[in-house]
Amino acid sequence: APVYCCAFDMSNKLFITGADDRLVKIWSSSTGLLLATLRGHEGEITEIKVSADNKLLATAATDATVRIWDLATGAPVAVLPHRRTVNYVSFGSSFQEDTNFAISVTEDGKICLWPVSEFRKCDGGMNPSLCPIILNHDILDKESNILSLAVNQPGTTFATASMDGSISVWSLKPITATGDRRWGCLRGHTKSIRTLQFSHNGDRLLSGSEDGTARIWQWRKDVQGSNMFSRPVILGQPNGSTGNETVGTAGGYVLGSVSLSVSTARSIVKGPRAVDMIRWNRDDTKVVTAESSIRLRADGRVDTQLRVWNSTTGEMLFLLGENILQSSIYVLDSHPFDPRLVVS
């Protein structure tokens, strides 16, 4: 069956896959042997995530549920019902009670925060008394949905991106007396944002869009407490010029960005392109982008390209597989220990 999502556990000893056969499978990453099969979903598996303490596994599916499993035993812990298909699921910090949430995102733009401490009341199934905290991503186009979710390494901040080209950055803790959790909304991409990822140290956010750019958003505390971020450096402009005009806000933080413009860098792909996937390498010094041509070739194939960039300057370093890649890339990940290696 086609596999739609996969994840390593925190020890890298287990490898978990989700497919269109509605099954979640747990494999040994060293031997490749199937260790367990988890059944219960009635739709295709869309996302898999493991909690930071390596105790819980969350799986999302087109059956409008998130299922929580005990990773050690494979036993069901809880079933979290939704009204629409769940596209993404993740965990906040497992080590702080006030950020210990399972985070789910549905196709209609709803973000649900589920308190992990309440899962024990579910007894492996649904509990009608378990109610999530619901957040709404700012969507300009009401027909748009959230296309990506990313959680930072400490598990205290997360970001969502949508088809309208906006990114909302959230705190798992309330940041105002009224309970608001959103730091701010980042705008700059002109088309749908397909992919997001925080750096491993959690201080930068990488976004990739159908507009042909990937952007690195830099967080740092401002001395005056002002909230701004600057226009990005665009590759291909004279001297890498950039403006200082403020283009957005985010509570208490300066957000600077570097733009990796795949539309202006040296390319083997002809015509308009989109950034499909992005990844930091293990030490965050480099960024890898997977890009595809929006127009099909005469033989029906999609031209694709892997590029490696300097994450500080935005300079393109080199191409990967320049004469090999002739089909779409669905998986891109960095090695958990070695910053030199990436898998596609």
Image: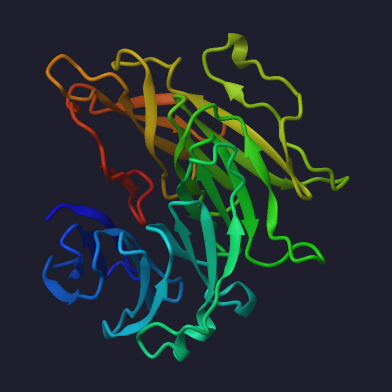
Left or right: where 175 falls relative to 326: right
From what the image shows, is residue 330 above or below residue 47? Answer: above
Q: Relative to 105, does residue 271 appear above or below in the rendering? A: above
Residue 129 against residue 246 in the figure, above or below: below
Q: Residue at x 20, y 65 (%)?
A: 22
Residue 10 seen in the current view: no
| Colouring scheme, one of rainbow, by chain, secondary structure, one colour | rainbow
Up/down of 13 relative to 319, above or below: below
The quadrant in which the N terminus is found is: bottom left
Q: Position of residue 275 (x, y in %)?
A: 40, 31
Q: How many marks?
A: 0
Residue depicted at 23% across the width and 62% down the height: 17
Most extreme residue toward the right is 224
Depth check: give the residue in front, 198 or 339.
198
Judged left or right of residue 108, residue 55 is left
Percent of width and height locating residue 311: 51, 35
Between residue 262 and residue 115, name the one nearer to us.
Answer: 115
Tell me what residue is drawn at x 76 percent, y 29 percent: 246
Q: In the displayed structure, does residue 301 sit left or right of residue 170?
A: left
Q: Return the residue nearer the eye: 151 or 223.
A: 151
Q: Quadrant of residue 242?
A: top right
- Which quarter of the rendered picture does the C terminus lie within? top left
Residue furthest to the top in view is: 238
* Residue 324: image location, x then y, percent: 17, 26
Residue 176: percent from left, percent from top: 79, 62
Front residue of 122 and 117: 122
Residue 178 visible in the picture: yes
